[in-house]
Image (cartoon, rainbow, N blue to C red):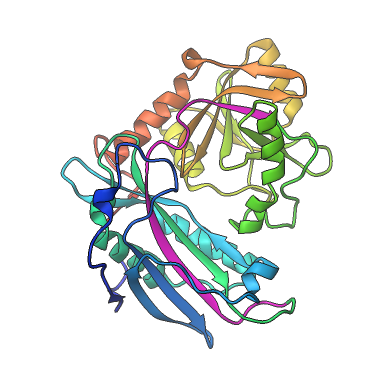
């Protein structure tokens, strides 16, 4: 538990919560009444405050706009049956956030600002957490460079903010994925493991082209052969191969170290599953499908938790799955949900109480 932080809190005069239909929540469209903001200057973080959600006033020469120093995280808060609010694994997101900051040559955010600031913000906007199944309060911490001058160099000033968004299920239906063979998301030595804005901006064209062909997203591959599988646009990927579960390894730094990925691996091992984190070649997956050994494909991420994949296409070859195939992924999702709902014990201390 971090020490209490002196945060100035200015509350709205009237909440807009009554204007929002919490029964119909598209992802990332609505935001709560308040946000947290902090500033970095002269080598330290200052002016930590919670204030009404509002637009930012930005200079046209803002360094983040021109040179891309911008990182973020995705976290979720929930309510239990008794109405108690908690956050799922925020310390893991703090660790990843600061790894992204170091890779992007940005200052780290102290634990007392990231964790305690988040706790206080959610405490203020606790009523915004939906109580329905498959619903949550999405938490978006982010930081960007704020120097106002042109010149390719690290900024000396930054803003750190946290905003909150009540949300329903991210993917209302199973996904159709295409293996990407033209564009590249990340290379060894690059920034693939960092949750920086540029990774997502650079992925949009491939996703748009895939959607024009009837798919939802792409499964990224290596830059040299376009054969070694990495991750889907917004989630890590798992393959159930006969008697084992395989997911691409983190070793070369091209994919995100997903918090949900880690949670799923832990749950799978608790279930007695044989989990392998290793390089995965697309030919292995195609061959396993042809022999019937590829049982399931699913994605994991904060927004979706578990995303079922009904189609995985490699060139003209399509691997199709249906609800009857999603046995292991459904059980993993059930167990993760049961831990969050406090129907199963939180033996890993994943739940951080508000």
Q: Is residue 34 above or below residue 137?
A: below
- In the displayed structure, 13 sits above or below 73; it is below
Residue 165 magenta-highlighted: yes
Residue 134, image quadrant: top left
Residue at 51% x, 37% y is 300
In this view, which residue lies farthest toward the left? 82
Left or right of 135? Residue 200 is right
Quadrant placement of the N terminus = bottom left
- Which quarter of the rendered picture does the C terminus lie within? bottom left
Residue range highlighted in magenta = 153-178
Identify which residue, 112 or 63, lies in the foreground. 63
Q: 31 or 348: which is nearer to us?
A: 31
54 left or right of 15 in image: right
User: Where in the figure is residue 258, as x and y percent of width and height?
Assistant: 53, 47
Image x and y of residue 71, in percent: 57, 62
Identify the residue shown where x is 28% and y is 44%: 130
Query: Where residue 162 sits: x, y (%)?
Result: 42, 63
The residue under the point 41% across, 60% down is: 163
Query: Vertical placement of 28 versus 158: above or below?
Result: above
Identify the residue at image location x=49%, y=43%: 262
Residue at the limit of the structure toward the bottom, as seen here: 42
Q: Quadrant of residue 51?
A: bottom left
Percent across and percent down for residue 160 are 47, 70
Q: Is residue 87 magenta?
A: no
> Which quadrant holds residue 332?
top left
């Amino acid at each position: 538990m971090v020490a209490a932080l002196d945060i100035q809190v200015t509350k709205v005069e009237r909440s807009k919560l009554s204007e929002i239909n919490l029964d119909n929540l598209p992802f990332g469209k609505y935001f709560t009444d308040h946000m947290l903001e902090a500033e970095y200057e002269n080598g330290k973080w200052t002016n930590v405050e919670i204030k009404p959600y509002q637009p930012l006033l930005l200079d046209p020469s803002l360094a983040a706009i021109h040179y891309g120093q911008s990182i973020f995280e995705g976290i979720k808060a929930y309510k239990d049956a008794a109405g108690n609010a908690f956050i799922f694994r925020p310390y893991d997101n703090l660790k990843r956030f600061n790894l992204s900051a170091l890779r992007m040559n940005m200052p780290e955010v102290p634990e007392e600002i990231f964790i305690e600031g988040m706790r206080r913000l959610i405490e203020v906007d606790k009523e915004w957490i939906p109580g329905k199944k498959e619903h949550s309060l999405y938490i978006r911490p982010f930081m960007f460079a704020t120097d106002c001058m042109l010149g390719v160099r690290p900024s000396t000033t930054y803003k750190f903010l946290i905003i909150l968004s009540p949300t329903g299920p991210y993917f209302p239906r199973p996904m159709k994925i295409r293996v990407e063979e033209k564009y590249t998301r990340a290379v060894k030595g690059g920034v693939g493991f960092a949750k920086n804005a540029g990774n997502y901006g650079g992925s949009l064209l491939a996703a748009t082209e895939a959607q024009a062909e009837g798919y939802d997203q792409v499964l990224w591959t290596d830059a040299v052969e376009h054969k070694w599988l990495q991750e889907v646009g917004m989630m890590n990927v798992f393959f159930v191969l006969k008697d084992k579960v395989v997911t691409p390894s983190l070793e070369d730094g091209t994919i995100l170290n997903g918090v949900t990925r880690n949670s799923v691996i832990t749950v799978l091992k608790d279930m007695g599953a044989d989990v392998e984190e290793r390089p995965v070649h697309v030919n292995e997956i195609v061959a396993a499908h042809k022999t019937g050994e590829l049982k399931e494909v699913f994605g994991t991420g904060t927004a979706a938790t578990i995303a079922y994949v009904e189609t995985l296409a490699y060139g003209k070859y399509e691997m199709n799955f249906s609800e009857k195939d999603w046995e292991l992924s459904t059980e993993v999702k059930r167990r993760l949900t049961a831990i969050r709902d406090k129907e199963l014990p939180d033996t890993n201390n994943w739940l951080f109480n508000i």
